[in-house]
Structure formats: C-alpha cells, structure tokens
Image (cartoon, helix red, strand yellow):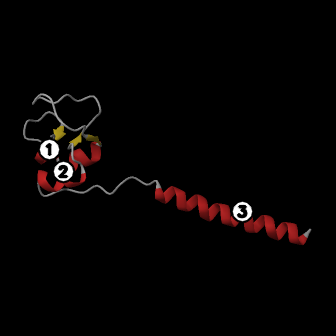
Amino acid sequence: MKKFTAMLVSAMVGMSVFAGFTDSAEAAPKIVEYKNCTELTKVYPGGVARTASVKNKGGKTKKKPFVSKELYDANDKSDRDNDLIACER
C-alpha cells in the first residue's frame, strides 16, 4: 500500500508540474511597441487589426492582419488612416 501511495503522490506531483508548464506555454504573447511599420511588419506581415470586424479604408490588402486589441493599442500611432488596422499591407 505504501508503494501505491508513493506512486500516486509522485504521479500527482508530475501532473501538476506538467499542468503548470502548459499554462505558461499558452500565455499571451508579449505586447511590444514597435518603432515603425517596417519593424512591425517583420513580425506581422499583414499589420495588426484592433478587432476581426474592422474594414480597411485603403481598399484591398495583400495579407490578412493579425488581430489583437492590446497589440494594436500599443502601436496605434502607426495607423495613419485611422481604420483600426496598423501597418496594413
């Protein structure tokens, strides 16, 4: 019985460590304020949209923007046409 209890405790500790690891691995990406659109589009080629429902004022774009309210808010200075998409291409 002691062996079984020790194995059970060991398994539970292992599972809790693993569960903690997966939570941190799925954490939100770090919000970065980019210097300009050249820097932002290196990471997000289609730019960054505030919401998925915004429409581009400039017409058709070649790439779909990444959607993130926090990332857009940190880089809203790069949205020249104020259509809620920063650095669209």
Residues at discs 1 and 2 in contact (Cβ within 8 Å): yes
Label 2, secondary structure: give it.
helix
As drawn, the label of residue 12 is 3
Q: CA distance from mark 3 to mark 1?
A: 47 Å
Question: Quadrant of residue 30 in the image?
Answer: bottom left
Question: Quadrant of residue 67 in the image?
Answer: top left
- Which one is earlier in the sequence, the residue at label 3 or at label 1? 3
- Of the residues shown, which amino acid type is indicated by label 2? Thr
Q: Residue at x 51, y 56 (%)?
A: 23
Q: Label 1, on which residue?
A: 87
Residues at discs 3 and 2 in contact (Cβ within 8 Å): no
Q: Residue at x 12, y 54 (%)?
A: 38
- Of the residues shown, which amino acid type is indicated by label 1? Cys
Q: Position of residue 75 (x, y in %)?
A: 18, 49
Q: Taking 47 as reference, is 23 above or below it?
A: below
- Which one is earlier in the sequence, the residue at label 3 or at label 2? 3
Q: Position of residue 59 (x, y in %)?
A: 12, 28
- Which one is earlier in the sequence, the residue at label 1 or at label 2? 2
Q: Residue at x 61, y 65 (%)?
A: 17
Compared across the picture, whether 58 is left or right of 1 comes to: left
Viewer-side residue, 28 vs 61:
61
Which quarter of the rendered picture does the C terminus lie within? top left
Q: Label 2, on which residue?
A: 41
Q: Position of residue 26 (x, y in %)?
A: 46, 53
Question: Quadrant of residue 16 in the image?
Answer: bottom right
Compared across the picture, whether 28 is left or right of 77 comes to: right
Viewer-side residue, 40 vs 32:
40
**Mark 3 vs mark 2: in front:** 2
Q: Residue at x 84, y 67 (%)?
A: 5
What is the count of numbered marks?
A: 3
